[in-house]
Amino acid sequence: MRFTILGPVGAVAPGPQPPRLAPRHRAVLAYLLLHAGVVISTDRLIDAMWGPLPPDSARAQIQTTVAAIRRMLRASGADQMLATHPAGYMITPEPGQLDLDEFANLIAKAQATSGDQQDTADQIRAALALWRGEPLADITADYVESARARLNGQRLTAIERLADVELSLGHQDDLIDELTIHVAANPVRERLCGQLMLALHRAGRQPDALHVARTFRATLAEQQGLDPGHAFIKLEQAILRDDPDLQAPAAAPMKSQRVNFLPYDVPDFTGREGELDRLARSWTSNNGGVVTISAIDGMAGVGKTALAVHAGHHLADHFPDGQLFVDLQAHTAGQAPLEAGAALEVLLGQLGVPAERIPASVADRAAVWRSELSGRRVLAVLDNALSADHVRPLLPGTSSALILITSRRRLTDLDGAHALSMDVLPAADAVELFTAIVGERADAEPVAVLDVLQLCGFLPLAVRIAAARLHHRPRWTVEYLADRLRDQRRRLGPPRPGTPSKPATRRHGGRSTHAPRPR
């Protein structure tokens, strides 16, 4: 799972999405995530949600909310993440599951970077890219305002650190627009205003730099009744004197910004060597000179997205201008398919195109997309497409690009596309995947493992979910898991169309054989 609080609060899992939490439930989840690894008492949760005037039903509401969060986690095989202790509740996401932790880790890495200022800047930019708007954007609770201010403070500190690094590298011309936006949003942030003044002065725009200083003075006096600090006054006077000490250092050469928006590549990706080889050969056969389109189709849960993401990471070195990703949401429960215009806005944003340069119409956005990709070597994953018409506006013109499209339908009418239809996992690969997650317990019960895999239809997503359930329950045996899966099947009744209704089969020389059971 992945949790987000640097923007709207959410929980996303691979495959079918977990039940969506109500706003109050998301508020409690966000508070627990803000204090991950710490036991939070019920009284503290009540105070965080309602402050000094909680309702009479506050304790019952907290218990109901925790139960709803547990149901959501259980649906994704992660119910052990939220533990109950005598003193309260504690949530412990794993590394890489919480965007706030990832932000903090990247900032720490940037601070630990010695010598190479460009690497420091790259780490900070990667951290800031995790923000998707106002933190805790879609929840209300008594604690939210102070928590939001604290998080925004961390973000602004990172922005100011980045500006210092970029100024030391002589990149003031590239920094002015960015700093202007931040100063407009934070007009009494003294350090930010000083950095913008210095960047403008170094760019030969002394009057503009002094205008920023006058505006800051007036706003600070009006809003807070204060005068600027000593460091700000000293900088302002140095700009008035055109002090030579303010001259920019020789600009360091800009590294090409390598962007990678591909989702997390699961470490236990198993099998699919033939499919990966076909995807690689489809691109190399074109010598990287034209757009290559590979359309991956297959039933739900067969591993289309996992394959495309794994292939994207595997081939990333061949595409130094970036790896992009957009979920088109054609088969996402509770979501309408993402329209081409919205998808183009996401992709152009990932390429670094400013919002004000993205036109309104789909046709104009497609033209900008083709122009931006011209001459670039980019890999893009268009995930969860509805049809060929759904993705056609997203295809580049002449470009050394590789476009990987996933869909439940075979896109036969997509001109020039290499079709790759995915089947369920072979028995040996399914056993390997299950064992990689479960560990030695799988080796001790090989017959039961095959029972579980057959009940999962040898679908990678189902295998992964079943294995995760077992992994988080050390007292369960594999046979016990198989019995529970059989019971669930009986309760659910006949399988729905498109789901395996019997153990998966493999074809050998035109005939089907059931996956063998170990002796």
Image: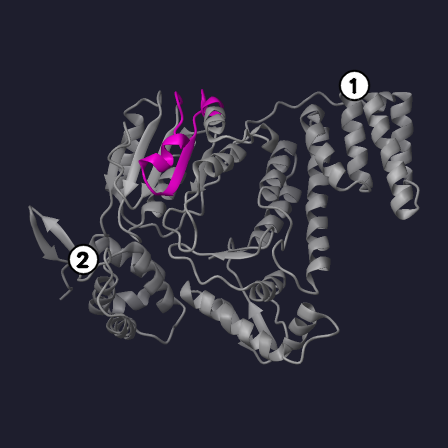
User: How dense is the environment of label 2, judged by Cα within 10 Å: few (below 14), some, or many (20 and up)?
Assistant: many
Between residue 114 and residue 517, name the one nearer to us. 517
Residue drawn 66% across and 43% down? 111
Q: Is residue 395 magenta?
A: yes
> Relative to residue 187, is residue 288 drawn left or right?
left
Q: Residue at x 68, y 68 (%)?
A: 48
Task: Measure the C-alpha gap from mark 1 to mark 2.
Answer: 70 Å
Question: What amino acid is at disc 2?
Answer: Ala
* Colouring of the image: one colour
Provide residue 370's location: percent of width, then percent of height.
45, 24
Q: Determine the secondary structure under disc 1.
A: loop
Say above or below: 271 vs 243: below
From the image, tell me which residue sits under label 1. 204
483 in relation to 415, above or below? below
Residue at 30% across / 56% down in the picture? 433
Element assignment for label 2:
loop
Judge whether residue 371 is colored magenta.
Answer: yes
In-front residue for pair 510/335: 335
Against 59, residue 362 (above or below) is: above
Q: Would residue 15 appear left or right of 226 to someone viewing this image?
A: left
In this rendering, the answer to whether 366 lies above or below 273 is: above
In magenta, the rendered stretch is 370-399
**Position of residue 262 in the picture relative to residue 455 (left or right):** right
Q: Which residue is mark 2?
A: 504
> Is residue 251 or residue 140 the one in the foreground?
140
- Residue 379: x percent and y percent? 41, 32
